[in-house]
Image: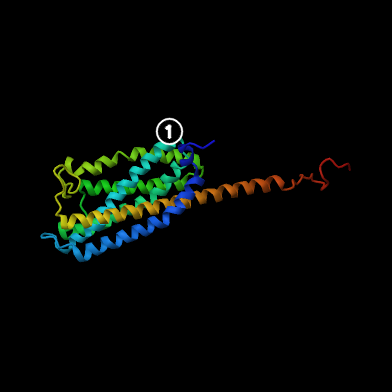
Amino acid sequence: MTPSLWTRLSNPSHFMRWSGAIVPWLATLSLAVLAVGLYQTFFVVPPDYQQGETVRIMYIHVPAAWLGVFFYGAMSVSAIGTLVWRHPLADVAQRAAAPVGAAFTLICLVTGSLWGKPMWGTYWVWDARLTSMLVLFLIYCGIIALWRTLEDPNRAARAVAILTLVGAVNLPIIKFSVNWWSTLHQPASILRMGGSTIDPSMLYPLLVMIAAATLGGTTLHLYTMRTEIMRRRVRTLTIREAERLDRTQPRITPQPSGGLPVGQPV
């Protein structure tokens, strides 16, 4: 009987087979797109009439911000898969996405600070967008710490899934913070009603960098998922081997104070 699509998608062995085939090609494609994007960023894109050469930070900052939010959204979907359907790969996908998303969020914060210094005169302001991104990074760190704190994998998966869904409230705040409050951060410039406000000479290279970052982030996520599956397999084999040795190890009968084995006549 042919297994259903859901069964095949939930099979870690099936995932290891197809991901092992696709990861090298995906990594090559992401490097190629990144090379094109970096060339356009540093040699093709003109300086901004107000920001000058510092506008080039945007081509790192915006993709990093996008992926920081994207991976948390993916973690939220995985959390639902863990709590509702108990999908075998949901917890793996969520655990693999956390460090990747945290890294991109940190890059976003660092590049935003470097960009803010010449534009705002300071590395940091408690702007709504900046503060909500900092909260996102702290949530990532809390989730990673919670995984490391709880030793029981099932208990950790449920606890992290609940925390992830609670933290998902921050995602719309990040998106609409520039519309809900008066902030220093510029409003949406790419995805907005009426079209993008960025000149095509800057917009297209930015879209290339976003595509390169998305491909690279997906590659890292798949690779980290494969590492997590292998780590869990090693843990399972280690536990089974320890249990086998415990069953086969001879038992030592306790002896009374006289030194003779229990039950032996004096």
What is the residue that sits farthest to the left in this orientation?
49
Is 129 in front, or is 8?
8
Residue 82, position as x, y percentages in the image: 44, 38
Is 198 in front, or is 52?
198
- For the point 52% across and 48% down, the residue is 232
- Answer few, some or many: residues within 10 Å of disc 1's Cα (few below 14, many 20 plus, some between 14 and 19): few
Q: Is residue 148 left or right of residue 111?
A: right
- For the point 34% across and 45% down, the residue is 72
What is the residue that sits farthest to the top in this orientation?
84
- Residue linked to disc 1: 84
Query: Is any part of residue 30 visible from this angle?
Result: yes
Q: How many marks?
A: 1
Q: Is residue 154 left or right of residue 237?
A: left
Q: Amino acid at mark 1?
A: Val
- For the point 43% across and 41% down, the residue is 90
Q: Is residue 228 left or right of residue 135?
A: right
What is the residue that sits farthest to the right in this orientation?
266
Residue 179, position as x, y percentages in the image: 17, 42
Q: Quadrant of the N terminus?
A: top right
Rendered view: 174 above or below 45:
above
Q: Quadrant of the C terminus?
A: top right
Q: Is residue 232 left or right of residue 199?
A: right
- For the point 24% across and 41% down, the residue is 173
Rendered view: 246 above or below 213:
above
Residue 109, position as x, y percentages in the image: 27, 54
Residue 56, position as x, y percentages in the image: 20, 61
Question: Please, what secondary structure does the residue beneath circle 1 have?
Answer: helix
Query: Is any part of residue 146 visible from this angle?
Result: no
How is the model colour-coded? rainbow
